[in-house]
Image: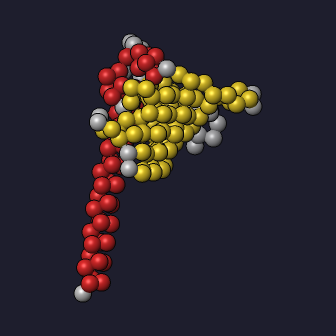
Amino acid sequence: MKGLVVFALFLLCFITNGFAQSDDESAIKKTIANLFTGMKGGDSTLTRSAFAPAAIMQTIANKEGKVSIRTESVNNFIKFIGAPHQDKYDERIVFTKILIDGPLASVWTDYKFYLGEKFSHCGVNSFQLVKGDQGWQIVYIIDTRRKEGCN
C-alpha cells in the first residue's frame, strides 16, 4: 500500500509539472509571437512588451568568410519598427526547441524573413527569456542571417 501511495504522489508531481511546462511553453511562444506580430504590424508597443528592460540584441554577420558579431540597440529597433514604412517586416518562424528550467528559457527558432511579399533572408534565432513580474520576457537574442540554404 505504501508503494502505491508513493507511486501516486510521483505520478501527481509528474502530471502537475507537465501542465506547468505546457503553460510556460505557451507563454514563451506568445512572448516571441508578440515580437514578430508587432514587427509585422508596425506596433512598437507590442514589440516592446516582448523585451525585458535591459535586453540585448545581436546578429552574427558573415561577410566573405569573416565572422563578426554586431550588437543592436533594442530601443533603436523598437523605434525602427514603429516608424512609418511601406513594406511589412514579416519574419516567419518555426519553434525548433524550447528548454525551460524554472524562470529561465532557451528557445531556438528557424526563420525566413520577407520584406512585404519579397523573400529577403533566412537564419536561426536563439532567445534567452526570463520569467519575472511581467511574465516571460526576452533578455537576449542573437541570430544568423543568410540568403542560401533557405529551403
Quadrant occupied by the N terminus:
bottom left
Count numbered badges in the picture: 0
Quadrant occupied by the C terminus:
top right
Drawn side of residue 8 relative to residue 54, left or right: left
Horizontal and vertical percent for residue 125?
Answer: 52, 38
The residue shown at (36%, 25%) is 48
**Frontmost residue, 25 versus 104:** 104
Give the image quarter of residue 43.
top left
Q: Residue furthest front?
A: 2
Horizontal and vertical percent for residue 140?
Answer: 48, 34
Horizontal and vertical percent for residue 96?
Answer: 48, 49
**Frontmost residue, 133 versus 105:** 133
Drawn side of residue 51 relative to residue 3, left or right: right
Q: Residue furthest bottom?
A: 1
Drawn side of residue 55 relative to residue 67, left or right: left
**Frontmost residue, 54 versus 43:** 54
Which color scheme did the rendering employ for the protein?
secondary structure
Q: Is residue 16 above or below residue 144?
A: below
Q: Residue furthest right?
A: 65
The residue shown at (47%, 45%) is 106
Give the image quarter of residue 122.
top right
Drawn side of residue 42 relative to residue 113, left or right: left
State whether residue 83 appears in this view: yes
Give the image quarter of residue 8.
bottom left
State whether residue 40 appears in this view: no
